[in-house]
Image (cartoon, rainbow, N blue to C red):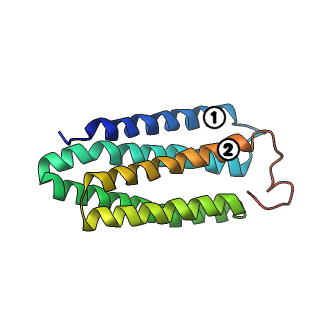
Amino acid sequence: MIPDAGFVFSIAGLNASFAGLGGLLIGLRRGADAQPLDTLRLRQVVEFAFANLLLAISVQPFVALLGPDGGFRLSGGLALVAIVGALPILQRRVARVGIAWGRWWAASAIALTAIGAVLAAATVLAPVAGTYELLMIVMLARPMVTFLLVLGAIDEPDPVSAGGPAQ
């Protein structure tokens, strides 16, 4: 068992909670009142949370099988693939539904992606539990920030339908 397994498993539990909340909101907002931007963001919440959950719980068996250095390196490498791999998928989805990148959405996505990629690369290069734990916190922030953007837009008109830029 890795020394900080409780912390990593807590992160996994928090991600599972975000996945559940995102799924609940998707179900509640289906239909005519579902806005393309909210639907995209809620889908992101669930996808980020599931990926993060798998990354958080997989570190323990990787460390058990490969030792601490190999386990954290593999986990950091998989996180880097998940972070970088999400970018073209997100770009395609945004373009498909015609959503403009808004100022706050873009800033948060770029910042969290950059910080996550740096921490994932650092974990690969110098595998330390603390670096991986910081990575897990940043990865948790991705669905958290996206969820907050959805909550902040619940009572606002859809900027895409209104002809304005998406925030």
Residue closer to the observer: 161 or 12: 12
Question: Relative to residue 100, is residue 49 drawn left or right?
Answer: left
Q: Cα distance, mark 2 to mark 1?
A: 9 Å
Query: Which amino acid type corresponds to the residue marked 1 in the rendered image?
Result: Leu
- Provide residue 36's location: percent of width, then percent of height: 71, 50
Point 22% across, 43% down: residue: 60
- Provide residue 153's location: percent of width, then percent of height: 75, 44
The kind of secondary structure element at disc 1 is helix
Point 36% across, 57% down: residue: 79
Residue occupying the far front of the picture: 130
Asked if disc 2 and disc 1 are in contact, CB closer than 8 Å, the reply is: yes
Point 81% across, 54% down: residue: 159
Q: Is residue 58 above or below residue 111?
A: above
Instruction: Answer few, some or many: residues within 10 Å of disc 2's Cα (few below 14, many 20 plus, some between 14 and 19).
Output: many
Front tag of 2 and 1: 2
Res. 72 visible in picture:
yes
Question: Relative to residue 74, is residue 109 drawn left or right?
Answer: right
The numbered dot on residue 137 is none
Quadrant assignment, res 154: top right
Residue linked to disc 1 = 25
Q: In this view, does 136 lie above or below 89?
A: above
Residue linked to disc 2 = 150
